[in-house]
Amino acid sequence: MVEDIGRAIALMLVFEGILPFVAPRRWQEMMKVLSILEERSLRSIGLFSMGVGIVLLWLLR
């Protein structure tokens, strides 16, 4: 189980690093937009992302 969690974190880091590597200026622009969003909007984005992740995990199990 610990190995699976480690693999999941490693894969997340790979995916998180793709956009800054491929399009750093676009990534910076996106970070600027996210920095001015309200806390409620950021929480909604996070909730949506978690929901999509849970659904994908459930479909791929």
Image (cartoon, rainbow, N blue to C red):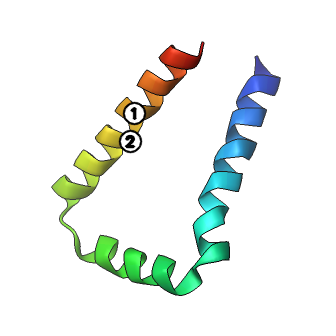
Q: Is residue 23 left or right of residue 5?
A: left
Q: Amino acid at mark 2?
A: Ser
Q: Position of residue 43 (x, y in %)?
A: 26, 49
Q: Position of residue 35 (x, y in %)?
A: 32, 75
Task: Report the Cα–Cα distance between label 1 and label 2.
Answer: 5 Å
**Residue for badge 1:** 52
Which numbered disc covers residue 49? 2
The structure residue drawn at horizontal position 68% and vertical position 53%, both measured from the top left corner, is 13
The structure residue drawn at horizontal position 39% and vertical position 75%, both measured from the top left corner, is 30
- The quadrant holding residue 54 is top left
Q: Are marks 1 and 2 in contact (CB under 8 Å)?
A: yes
Q: Position of residue 34 (x, y in %)?
A: 32, 70
- Seen in the picture, residue 44 relative to 37 is either above or below; the reply is above
Assign the N terminus to one quadrant of the image: top right
Q: Position of residue 40 (x, y in %)?
A: 17, 54
Dot 1 lies on which element?
Answer: helix
